[in-house]
Amino acid sequence: MTRCPECDAEIDLDEDEVEEGEIVGCPECDVELEVTQTHPIHLILISEDEDEDEEDDDEEGEDEEPGAVEEEEEEAE
């Protein structure tokens, strides 16, 4: 038995049935948790901010590429 780091609810997970890196959900607060250790089970909260940061990085990279092409075209003229 382990507890949700967000709401402290008990989560019934069997050490032999989960793997490190597995994503599980809290039945009480519905957050996603990652198994970081299996003996004993340790869970960490997966932050939604990290997902948003990755998306922002992707969008920024897309903005930079067209600008780089424009600079190359200007130099050619």
Image (spheres, rainbow, N blue to C red):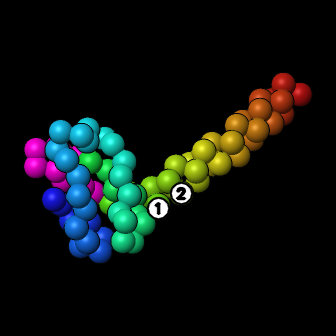
Question: Farthest right residue?
Answer: 77
Label 1 sits on what residue type? Asp
**In the picture provided, is 71 more to the left or to the right than 24?**
right
Q: Secondary structure at mark 2?
A: helix
Q: Secondary structure at mark 1?
A: helix
**Magenta span dominant secondary structure:** strand
- Residue at position x 70%, y 46% in the image: 63
| Residue named by callout 1 | 49
In which image quadrant can residue 71 be found?
A: top right
CA separation, marks 2 and 1?
Answer: 5 Å
Quadrant of the snapshot with the N terminus: bottom left
- Residue at position x 45%, y 55% in the image: 50
- Residue at position x 26%, y 71% in the image: 9
- Residue at position x 25%, y 41% in the image: 18
Q: Is residue 76 magenta?
A: no
| Residue named by callout 2 | 52
Where residue 31 appears, x then y in whole percent?
40, 64
Q: Is residue 68 above or below residue 24?
A: above
Where residue 28 appears, x then y in whole percent?
36, 71
Nearest the viewer among 11 and 45 is 11
Label 2 sits on what residue type? Glu
Query: What span is in magenta?
Result: 36-44
Residue 16's tag is none
